[in-house]
């Protein structure tokens, strides 16, 4: 037998802790009240007419009825049968830029934090697709391989920061090649998407050529450029005294702008690729992007999962509990008249 709600078993502790003491207290109070209001002669006649065994039986019926209802709440089920479930979906790899420029606050609370919120929202609506997360800056790191375990992917996402990669810089091309060579399966040349989230300031990693290689493998790239592509934004950091300052280079503050042209080349190098710009005052909604571009696209069968199917049997215990309650109500405390 399998229980669907094992926590309900804790309610059984109410029987020795509450129900039995209440029944004993009720017997005691009934006898005490009779002694207070009935004369000794009348008390003897009442005691002769009342069956102690039936009083105990009524209490037992209520306790067993309570236990039956608790067992029904545990959702008991048995008669297991194997059932194979086929899952359809696409393989989606998220390439998330974790370079220091993603700390810019032109998109609140920052480019990186807004990206993490959007990815978390995306995982709420995924239905069968496998997801992977790769962070990149000066090098690329697989934080979550392709999986349908969205809880694990969400845990990996929470730990991502600008410290997730060991080298500074922004090498978009290397991140794309990492997804092609390591993340995606080599067996198929369809049903694969890369969601690239970055400010696009690449440092000579040849991202357009990497995108062309992705296109040969049947991979589509959806590139999302974060930040202001006109003025740009400063990069906040913390100095040795814990004070917020802005990143400088050769005595001048560094302003990070979106390289939209590079990201367009990356996206449109793949069949069906798309470039989306998310600037200050606009919303990064990966759920909408998923619904428009990925959910409606062709899917393939992922691994089949064999699950055990059980017959629900809570009705038996619920019915037993109700019958026992009715029996308790119909049971009289009086002895049979002779």
Image: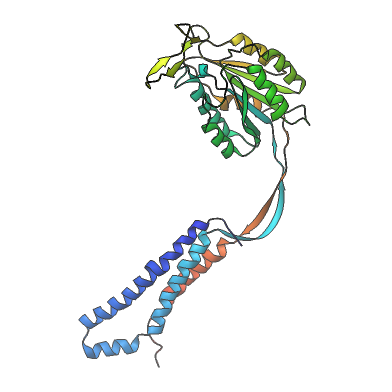
Please provide percent x and percent y for residue 277: 56, 14
Quadrant, the C terminus: bottom left
**Quarter residue 49 falls in:** bottom left
Tell me: residue 52, above or below residue 73. Answer: below
Quadrant, the N terminus: bottom right
With 176 as the anchor, is 121 left or right in this view? left
The residue closer to the viewer here, 232 or 204, is 204
- Residue at x-position 68% and y-position 24%: 178
Tell me: residue 174, above or below residue 229. Answer: below
Tell me: residue 277, above or below residue 163. Answer: above
- Residue at x-position 52% and y-position 69%: 320
Q: From this viewpoint, which residue is outermost toward the front?
A: 240
Please provide percent x and percent y for residue 208: 69, 13
Please provide percent x and percent y for residue 204: 64, 11
**Quarter residue 262 falls in:** top right
- Residue at x-position 71% and y-position 54%: 82
The residue closer to the viewer here, 241 or 122, is 241
Tell me: residue 141, above or below residue 87. Answer: above
């Amino acid at each position: 037998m399998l229980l669907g709600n094992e926590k309900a078993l804790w309610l059984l502790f109410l029987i020795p802790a509450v129900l039995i003491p209440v029944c004993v207290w009720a017997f005691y109070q009934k006898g005490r009240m009779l002694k207070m209001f009935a004369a000794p002669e009348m008390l003897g006649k009442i005691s002769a007419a009342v069956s102690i065994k039936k009083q105990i039986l009524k209490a037992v019926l209520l306790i067993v009825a309570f236990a039956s209802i608790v067992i029904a709440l545990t959702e008991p089920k048995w008669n297991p049968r194997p059932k194979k479930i086929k899952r359809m979906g696409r393989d989606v790899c998220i390439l998330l830029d974790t370079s220091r420029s993603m700390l810019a606050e032109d998109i609140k609370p920052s480019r990186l934090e807004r990206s993490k919120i959007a990815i978390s929202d995306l995982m709420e609506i995924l239905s069968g697709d496998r997801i992977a997360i790769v962070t990149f800056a000066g090098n690329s790191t697989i934080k979550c391989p392709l999986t349908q375990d969205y809880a694990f992917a969400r845990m990996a996402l929470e730990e991502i920061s600008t410290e997730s990669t060991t080298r500074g810089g922004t090498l978009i091309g290397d991140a794309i090649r990492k997804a092609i060579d390591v993340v995606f399966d080599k067996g198929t040349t369809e049903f694969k998407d890369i969601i690239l989230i970055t400010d696009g300031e690449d440092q000579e990693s040849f991202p357009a050529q990497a995108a062309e290689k992705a296109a040969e493998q049947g991979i589509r790239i959806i590139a999302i450029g974060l930040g202001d592509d006109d003025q740009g934004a400063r990069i906040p950091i913390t100095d040795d005294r814990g004070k917020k300052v802005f990143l400088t280079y050769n005595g001048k503050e560094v302003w990070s702008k979106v390289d939209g042209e590079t990201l367009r080349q990356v996206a449109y190098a793949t069949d069906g690729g798309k470039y989306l710009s998310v600037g200050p005052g606009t919303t990064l909604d990966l759920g909408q992007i998923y619904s428009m571009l990925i959910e409606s696209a062709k899917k393939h069968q992922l691994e089949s999962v064999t699950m055990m199917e059980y017959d629900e049997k809570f009705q038996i215990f619920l019915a037993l509990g109700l019958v026992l309650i009715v029996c308790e109500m119909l049971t009289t405390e009086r002895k049979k008249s002779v």
